[in-house]
Amino acid sequence: MCLGFVFAAQVSLVVNVASECGFTDQHYRALQQLQRDLGPHHFNVLAFPCNQFGQQEPDSNKEIENFARRTYSVSFPMFSKIAVTGTGAHPAFKFLTETSGKEPTWNFWKYLVAPDGKVVGAWDPTVSVEEIRPQVTALVRKLILKKREDL
């Protein structure tokens, strides 16, 4: 997958984010809380700004990151703005879409990726981060137990 080796062997929640969406406040707050509770050694939220849905992410990468860090104190990685659907979709999102069978249809689509790179869940923005927290936590717990066994 194209997310790089930095996040290999971790649980990741990959999210296409937007600063001016109706889901922005709820999702950014919940994503940061999840990052605070579970990251950064075994888990990371990976945020990919996207302006494809409703033109709700119009600013530059620097402005987007400043907004997220200033407004929501986000500590998770913020990547450069990308396309997540269509012919110009970033390879990471092509992979997520192909392997999950689910393509983003709006902002704050969430993909749960296991440490082995397999997509184990995909949710649209109407599914809250709190609703998927048990699956994320279970995957992180499983990873921690496996690392302990490997010691």
Image (cartoon, rainbow, N blue to C red):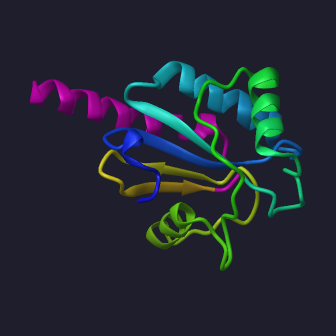
Count of numbered circles on the image: 0
Which image quarter: residue 22?
Answer: top right
Residue 103 locus on image (x, y percent): 62, 69
Residue 49 drawn at (x, y percent): 72, 49
Which corner quadrant of the image does residue 115 belong to?
top left
Question: Residue 54 appears at what percent x and percent y?
Answer: 89, 61
Residue 53 placement, left or right of 133 = right
Depth check: give the residue in front, 114 or 137. Answer: 114
Range of the magenta residues? 124-151
Q: Is residue 25 above or below residue 111?
A: above
Which residue: 16% across, 24% down? Answer: 148
x 59%, y 39%: residue: 131
Q: Which residue is drawn at the image coordinates 66% and 64% (left, top)? A: 84
Q: Is residue 129 magenta?
A: yes
Q: Say whether residue 114 is magenta.
A: no
Query: As displayed, is residue 145 above or below residue 37?
Result: below
112 lies above or below 118:
above
Residue at image x 59%, y 30%?
A: 76
Main SS of the magenta part reads helix
Q: Above or below — where is 128 with respect to 57?
A: above
Q: Where does the image place residue 130, in percent across and percent down from the top left? A: 61, 34
Task: Tell me the quadrant of the picture where the C terminus can be found.
Answer: top left
Can residue 126 be seen at all in this image of the molecule? Answer: no
Q: Nearer the viewer, residue 144 or 123?
A: 144
* In the displayed structure image, the side of residue 129 where residue 139 appears, left or right: left
Determine if residue 31 is in view.
yes
